[in-house]
Structures are given as C-alpha cells and as structure tokens.
Image: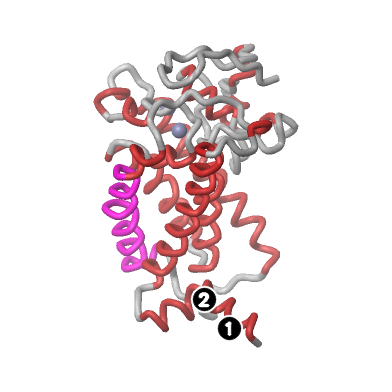
C-alpha cells in the first residue's frame, strides 16, 4: 500500500490533481527533475573524475555551471509554455480517458512512429537549415557548437531558434501527430531527458558495443560538424544510414584534437 501511494508521487494525473496544476505542467516538472538529476550525475562524475574508463573525451571548455543559465532559460521560457500551449490545443498531454487510452500492443507502434517523425524533423532541420552556409550563424546553431559533446547538460545549450526547431518542434509535433495521451507523452519526454544528456556527456557505458547508437556519433558531430546529423542514442538512425552521413561512412576513427587550455590535448581512438 505504501509503495502504491509512493508511486502516485510520479503518476502524472494524480499528481496534477493533487497539485491543481495542468497536466502539461506536471509532466514538464517530472521531465525537468529527471533531466537535471541526469545532468547532475554527469556533472558530478566529471568533477570527481568518476567512471573514467567509460569517458570518451573531455573536449569541452565550458563547465556545467557556465552552461546551466541558458539551459534553464530555454526550458522554462520555451519548452514549458509550448507544452502548456500544446495541451490547451488538445495536441499533447491529453488526459487519459476512454477516448485516449490505447491497448499495450500499440505502444511499440507509437514509439516507432515517434522515432521516425522526430528523426525526419531533427535530421532535416539540423542538416539542411542549421548546417547550411547561411543558417549556421543566422539561426544560431554556432551557439550549440561552442560545446563539444562532453558535458551532459549541453544538450539544451542552444540559441532560441535552434532550441525551438530541435527540441520544441522535434518533440511536440510528433506527439501532436500521434495524439496518444499524457502517459505516452511523459514517457517520450522523460526518455529524452535521459538519453539527450547521455548523448552529450562524452561517456559511452557500452564502450562501442552499440556503435551506431553510441554517444560517439554525436560527439563526432560536435567535433567535426560534417557528419552524424541525426539523434544517435534513442533514435533509429535511419537517415544517417540512408544518406550515408554517419561518422563511419567518412572513415573517421578518432576524435580530432581540440584546443583546450584546461585539459590535455589528445586524439582518442573510438573504434
Ligand atoms: Zn548536440
Ligand atoms: Zn550541428
């Protein structure tokens, strides 16, 4: 009984009723807490030099605390209001009811659909807008590329337009297309809160055994800019395979040296 009552603490519908908050705000709050716990885990691991066996590189100069203000600004000023807006329009965070409840066998279908929709938006915007000659600076993708993929919290260190395209639109539009319910939407954003920072952490806890789905992909993107445009961990990486733009299609086998006054310059082999 005690366990069940504790589970209600993270049950979004019960929680939103007891706190008298919109469901979208409750889901965002759970997402927010998970994201910052995960980022704190990576921040503490970096600070105390834990799990060094799994750390691929230390290319970033900016620290967790330097990145934090912009990340908080993006999440609270863009993502939270967008979640509320999506709920108000009935696009996402819909209250679980007879109409919105779906059988469990549909879950893998919805997860696959989300992954495909998200990848199409993310990859297209990332490769053809944000990395276009005119768009890289104009749309502010250079801000995200000041980070090098070795500090977890840098996932949300972005300019406003970049954040809107690659986080807000890439997550909420697929959810609006699927129109499941708040449980599914929460599952998706919490998954993103765990895998996004992992992708930017510079750690690979599977040490290359999940090559295509390793944070190596996104680290390589941050360090070389011309490869691996998709989300790596958690995505199906269909478009990088289709367009042959993963780092290994270019034969890259190591991270390039980066100028970093605080840390030793090194070239790390990844395969
Ligand atoms: Zn990134
Ligand atoms: Zn990029």
Indicate the position of residue 149 as horizontal and vertical percent values. 49, 30
Q: Is residue 169 left or right of residue 35?
A: left
- Asked whether residue 56 appears in the rendered view, the answer is yes
Name the residue nearer the viewer: 52 or 19: 52
Q: Give the quarter of the image for residue 202.
A: top right
Q: Magenta region: which residues?
A: 69-92
Q: Crowding at label 2, few (<14), some or many (≥20) Cα neighbours within 10 Å?
A: some
Image quarter for ligand 2 equals top left
Residue 196 visible in the shown view = no
Label 1 SS: helix
Relative height, residue 193 to residue 99 (above, below): above
Q: Which residue is mark 2?
A: 9
Label 1 and label 2: CA atoms lie apart by 7 Å
Counting from the top left corner in percent of width and height, residue 31 is at 46, 59
Residue 5: assigned label? 1
Name which residue lies at 38% across and 26% down: 145
Q: Main secondary structure of the magenta part?
A: helix
- Determine the residue located farthest toward the front in the rendered image: 48
* Residue 158 lies in quadrant: top left
Q: Going 32% across and 64% down the picture, which residue do you hit?
A: 84
Q: Secondary structure at mark 2?
A: helix
Residue 223 vertical position relative to residue 46 in the rendered view, above or below: above
Of residue 44 and residue 175, the one placed in the foreground of this image is: 44
- Above/below status of 8 relative to 73: below
Question: Residue 262: x percent and y percent?
Answer: 43, 21
Q: CB under 8 Å between callouts 1 and 2?
A: yes
Answer above or below: position of 111 versus 186: above
* Magenta-span inclusion, residue 178: no
- Which residue does the image show at 60% across and 54% down from the upper left? 111
Query: Does the stretch in magenta take in 76?
Result: yes
Query: In which quadrant will I find the N terminus?
Result: bottom right
């Amino acid at each position: 009984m005690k366990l069940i009552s504790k589970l209600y603490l993270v049950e979004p519908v019960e929680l939103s009723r007891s706190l008298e908050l919109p469901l979208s705000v409750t889901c965002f709050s759970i997402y927010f807490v998970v994201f910052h716990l995960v980022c704190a885990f990576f921040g503490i691991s970096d600070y105390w030099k834990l799990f060094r066996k799994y750390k691929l590189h230390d290319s970033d100069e900016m620290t967790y605390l330097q990145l934090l203000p912009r990340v908080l600004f993006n999440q609270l000023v863009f993502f939270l209001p967008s979640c509320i807006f999506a709920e108000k329009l009935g696009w996402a965070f819909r209250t679980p009811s007879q109409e919105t409840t779906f059988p469990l066998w549909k879950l893998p279908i919805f997860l696959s659909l989300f992954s495909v929709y998200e990848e199409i938006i993310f990859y297209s915007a990332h490769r053809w807008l944000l990395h276009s000659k005119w768009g890289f600076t104009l749309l502010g993708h250079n801000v995200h590329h000041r980070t090098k993929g070795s500090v977890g919290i840098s996932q949300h260190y972005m300019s406003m337009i970049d954040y809107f395209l690659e986080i807000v639109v890439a997550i909420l539009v697929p959810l609006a297309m699927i129109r499941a319910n708040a449980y599914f939407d929460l599952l998706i954003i919490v998954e993103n809160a765990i895998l996004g920072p992992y992708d930017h952490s510079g750690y690979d806890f599977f040490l290359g055994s999940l090559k295509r789905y390793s944070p190596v992909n996104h680290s390589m993107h941050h360090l070389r800019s011309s490869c691996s445009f998709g989300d790596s961990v958690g995505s199906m990486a269909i478009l990088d395979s289709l367009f042959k733009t993963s780092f290994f299609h270019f034969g890259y086998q190591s991270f390039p040296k980066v100028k970093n006054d605080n840390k030793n310059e090194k070239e790390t082999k990844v395969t």
